[in-house]
Image: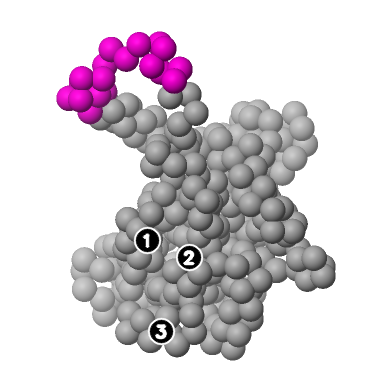
Amino acid sequence: MSIYRCNSCGFIAEVLPVEGQQAFCGRCAKPVTVYGTVFFVEKLLQRYALALREIKALKVAQEEEGEVEVSAAAASAKGDAPVALDNAFLPTQEQHAPLQSWFHARNILAKFAYDNVNMDGYFDEAARQIGEHYELLADVLGRIGWSYRKSHSGLNIELARLAQKDAATITRLCRNWYGGALFAKYFYQKNEKILRLGLQPAQPARQFFMGAWLEWFAIDALLDVFGQNRQQSFSCARGVKVVFPNEDLQELDAVALVGERLVSIECKTGEFRHEIDKLSRLQKRIGQPAEQFIICAAQLDAAQAQGLSSMYGMTFTNVQTLVPYLQRLAQRQ
């Protein structure tokens, strides 16, 4: 059997084995993604174990600081302090409200798709894995994207020329992605060292491999760097459509409101140089300083990113330098 959890109403149900396909919620009839039951339970247990470890670490920290016996009055006095976000709170109107207010104050209409930051699925984890191994996976991602554009149903990846460690990493990650229904089929011919992948026809998986993975990576980076700070407010969104007073429509790939600072990341997995002027005009219309308007371009090396940053009044990074840059930015507050 397979299983799904509706992000709209929270309904959970088992269905016939249509793992990786789109179905409709039995309660509210909204689209849902179906996962293999074993995979779903495995990920649920992983998140549960992670939560337990975090709780244990917090308790240890409190004991070391002598804060275990905080009175109810003291806790109430801190009621207005921001708290770390959890996955259930992210895809809600309440979480997006500070961003909505920030844009409204500048006479900009912001339209959100709340589920764009739903971290209960597998996209954020897969994007994090791509970011961690991007140099190794860049060619594989390029071939997957090319296969989608040519309407192929699958592709073969020859691993014989790679180092054993690199080949093992690619097969492990692709097997994990198949388990998360990002691929429709997975088969590794060990003797020939050929990896055979069936492309997932479902639109979310197609969009992920066609470039949305970098948006997931960016929003995950914003959450990791800024979202866990209990001393400042935080609101984030992905794929924000902004409408300016003259009715011009633009889209922001990943944004976070950190206190009163808006940090935005535009994500580019392909050629983007012809868009630099458009991005510069978008930056000026929103009114962001260079250090908070970031272009994360996967194809740039560090020297190119530094050169473009000095030339165009925006901050350019690549996949490897995005998180370190955000960490430095967080220290400037």
- What secondary structure do most residues of the magenta stretch adopt? helix
Residue 195 against residue 224 in the figure, above or below: below
Residue at x-position 44% and y-position 69%: 291
Label 3 environment density (alpha carbons within 10 Å; few <14, some 14–19, many ≥20): few
What numbered label is drawn on residue 310? 3
Q: Tell me the CA gap for discs 1 and 2.
A: 8 Å
The answer to whether residue 170 is left or right of residue 96 is left
- Give the CA separation, mark 3 to mark 1: 17 Å
- Which residue is painted at 58% across and 63% down in the image? 253
Q: Within 10 Å of the Cα at label 2, are there few (<14), some (14-19), or many (20+) other Cα atoms? A: some
Look at the image and tell me in which quarter the N terminus lies. top right
Q: Is residue 318 magenta?
A: no
Q: Position of residue 70 (x, y in %)?
A: 32, 15
Q: Position of residue 40 (x, y in %)?
A: 48, 37
Picture quarter containing residue 328?
Answer: bottom left
Task: State the SS at label 2.
Answer: helix
Q: Residues within 10 Å of mark 1 (few under 14, many from 20)?
A: some
